[in-house]
Image: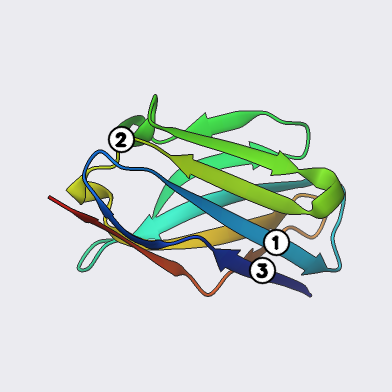
Amino acid sequence: QVQLVESGGGLVQAGGSLRLSCVASGNIFSLNVMGWYRQAPGKQRELVAAITSGGSTSYADSVKGRFTISRDNAKNTVYLQMNTLKPEDTAVYYCNYRRTVYPPMDYWGQGTQVTVSS
């Protein structure tokens, strides 16, 4: 089992910044992908950004150039720095841990609300 605890959400004005953190604990494997997903009301959950244990990153087109994902493997922590926030970034943000050794498994955090006011 892997437990994920997120922090850093909140209310911010458009153009502002927030930093999300997610700490993983439990049965952590060195080979994994950690990422952030978000789900707005009435919409499907979507990938925002992901980072492999080796440091390779990927981003949704909608956040490229504004969001930066990073991780501290020693602390089993992943971060999402969100700059130039827009009202359309409003959503519940979920941390994800994906074990990539067989058998692959997904774990999710409880979610943290990000609200961007116009």
Task: Give the residue drawn at x 49%, y 62%.
Answer: 94
Q: CA distance from mark 3 to mark 1?
A: 6 Å
Q: Amino acid at mark 2?
A: Thr
Q: Is 78 or 106 nearer to us in this picture? A: 78
**Of label 3 and label 1, which has the lower sequence position?**
3
Q: Is 47 or 70 nearer to us in this picture? A: 70
Is residue 45 visible in the rendered image? The answer is no
Task: Give the residue drawn at x 70%, y 42%.
Answer: 71
Task: For the residues labelled 3 and 1, say whether their Cβ atoms are less than 8 Å apart.
Answer: yes
**Residue ID for mark 1:** 23
Instruction: Left or right? Give the position of 90 relative to 60.
Output: left
Instruction: Left or right? Give the position of 11 relative to 30.
Output: left
Name the spot of residue 37 as percent of width and height, x first: 45, 54
Disc 2 element: loop
**Residue ID for mark 3:** 4
**Of label 3 and label 2, which has the lower sequence position?**
3
Which residue is most to the left?
Answer: 118
Q: Amino acid at mark 1?
A: Val
Task: Give the residue drawn at x 22%, y 43%.
Answer: 86
Q: CA distance from mark 3 to mark 2?
A: 26 Å
**Residue ID for mark 2:** 84
Disc 3 element: strand
